[in-house]
Image (spheres, grey):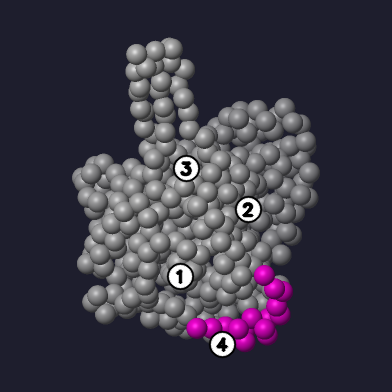
Amino acid sequence: MTSKSKAQWQQMAADLQIESRAFINGQYVDALSGNTRQTINPSNGDVLADVANCGAEDADIAVAGARAAYESGVWSDQSPDARRAVMVKWAQLIEDNADELALLETLDVGKPISDTTGSDVPGAIRTIRWSGEAVDKIYEQIAPTDKDSLGLVTRLPLGVVAAIVPWNFPLSTTAWKLGPSIASGNSVILKPASNTPLTAIRIAGLAKEAGLPDGVLQVLPGPGGSMGAHLATHMDIDGLTFTGSTPIGKKLLEYSGQSNLKRVFNELGGKSPNIVFADADLDKAASAAALACFYNGGQTCTAGTRLIVEESIHDEFVAKVIEATKAWQVGDVLDPATTLGPMVDKSQFNTVSEYIAIGDGEGCTRHGGDSNVFPDSGGHYLNPVIFTGVTNDMRIAQEEVFGPVLAVMTFKTKEEAIAIANDSIYGLAGAVWSRDIGTALSVAEKIRAGTVGVNNYFGGDITVPFGGFKQSGNGRDKSIHAFDDYTELKTTWINLE
């Protein structure tokens, strides 16, 4: 990935040719209906492309093609080493086209180009490559039977898997789904978010170029509600993986029960606690607290939106967080110096604005939060908001805002901090800051969340699992554990006498 100036990114954007069709059975095709849906640049309101708006008839063709590819064994019966080679080549092609993909993600989602070049695209490359390299290193088992029997425990692909991904991290989340599912031998129907489909469409062509057989990866841009319901109730889909909101995740589980009991793995919402003790490195913790909440405009399921601070340092620490927040101000997303882009669309802007009003109405003290930013740009920009005087029973402390809004609360004892942290329907992420390793580890152990940082936030890489407790979901993305979601265990029992 090259280092470009703002002017160079602007010129590349002006010259960009965007593929906007569905990818079905190895070909880019229009929706059968001919319908399209505009995808909009969140930064300025400009139309980026008219994207194929697929319906149930397109999905049925894609599922039939995926099933045929799976049953033929053209991919599922390939040796792990053969699949590894294709996955690694695919990762290399993504790397070869990294600038284009970073620009597509920035234009489609409203992410700063520094984020897509520094995190999103490199993360996707790493995920696809790592998943490919892992697949020929997953050993199966022989059970500890008596001498007259042999018990083989083997791992088989699920079959046809649907993957429904969100708009906030479309490329990196797509890679989390496609890496282990395709490497395991499945055929996959990818449903990108209707408002951010462009990188998903592009990497499908790169997969074919890498040698992935036709039908193994299908990409269906289209409406989330009707298409998601159709895929979730489809009788010829064996598994479904979803990242998105908790209400939709619950609905997908219902659809599974109404159809064929397909496996459903959900990574859902969060309202993550970030606990700071008085003995922490306060400068480091304050900088991390701003990052934890305001990165990606707060449009992050793991965002540390509940800052839980030991009472004795509240005023001092909040002042440090306010100072650290100055590094998170909106700007031109094609400027490499920009750290904060717009909300993804007007609807999200309105939702976040409503929560800011709720915080005001609940009697909190607001710091920052100028909503009239770049009013003539055509985009929807919000600078960070910090609320102090928050209690954990307030809506601003309990409900997922999905925007740059931080709720600050206080505690007096370790036990109170743990109680506040766990008083939530969610359990996705969190962090603890203390120089006392005993305090840090004991609190981290008690937090009911899938990922907890100790003296860091957003820690972890592809080698560790990612997912939530409680209403933050089930199943795991990333790491070798993700392969469990996309495979069946089979026992073959052999009598030797």
Of the two numbered discs 1 and 3 on the same chain, state the one appearing first in sequence.
1
For discs 2 and 3, the disc positioned in front in the rendered view: 3
Residue 102 vs residue 211, the one in the foreground:
211
In this figure, which residue is indicated by the disc labeled 1? 205
Give the quarter of the image for residue 451: top right
Task: Kindly identify the residue that appears in the image at 63 percent across and 36 percent down.
Answer: 411
**Inter-mark Cα distance, 2 to 3:** 28 Å
Q: In this rendering, would 220 be left or right of 7?
A: left
For discs 2 and 4, the disc positioned in front in the rendered view: 4
**Inter-mark Cα distance, 1 to 3:** 24 Å
**Marks 2 and 4: CB-CB under 8 Å?**
no
* Dot 1 amino acid type: Gly
Q: Secondary structure at mark 2?
A: helix
Residue 158 visible in the picture: yes
* Dot 4 amino acid type: Ala
Is 7 colored magenta in this rendering?
yes
For discs 1 and 2, the disc positioned in front in the rendered view: 1
Task: Say the numbered circle drawn on residue 483.
Answer: 3
Of the two numbered discs 2 and 3 on the same chain, state the one appearing first in sequence.
2
Give the quarter of the image for residue 391: top right
* Dot 2 amino acid type: Ala
Q: Secondary structure at mark 4?
A: helix
Dot 3 alpha-carbon crowd within 10 angstroms: few under 14, some 14 to 19, many 20 or more: many
* Dot 3 amino acid type: Phe
Task: Say the numbered circle drawn on residue 444.
Answer: none
Residue 366 visible in the picture: no
**Marks 1 and 3: CB-CB under 8 Å?**
no
Q: Secondary structure at mark 3?
A: helix
In this figure, which residue is indicated by the disc labeled 4? 14
Task: Kindly identify the residue that appears in the image at 72 percent across and 27 percent down.
Answer: 438
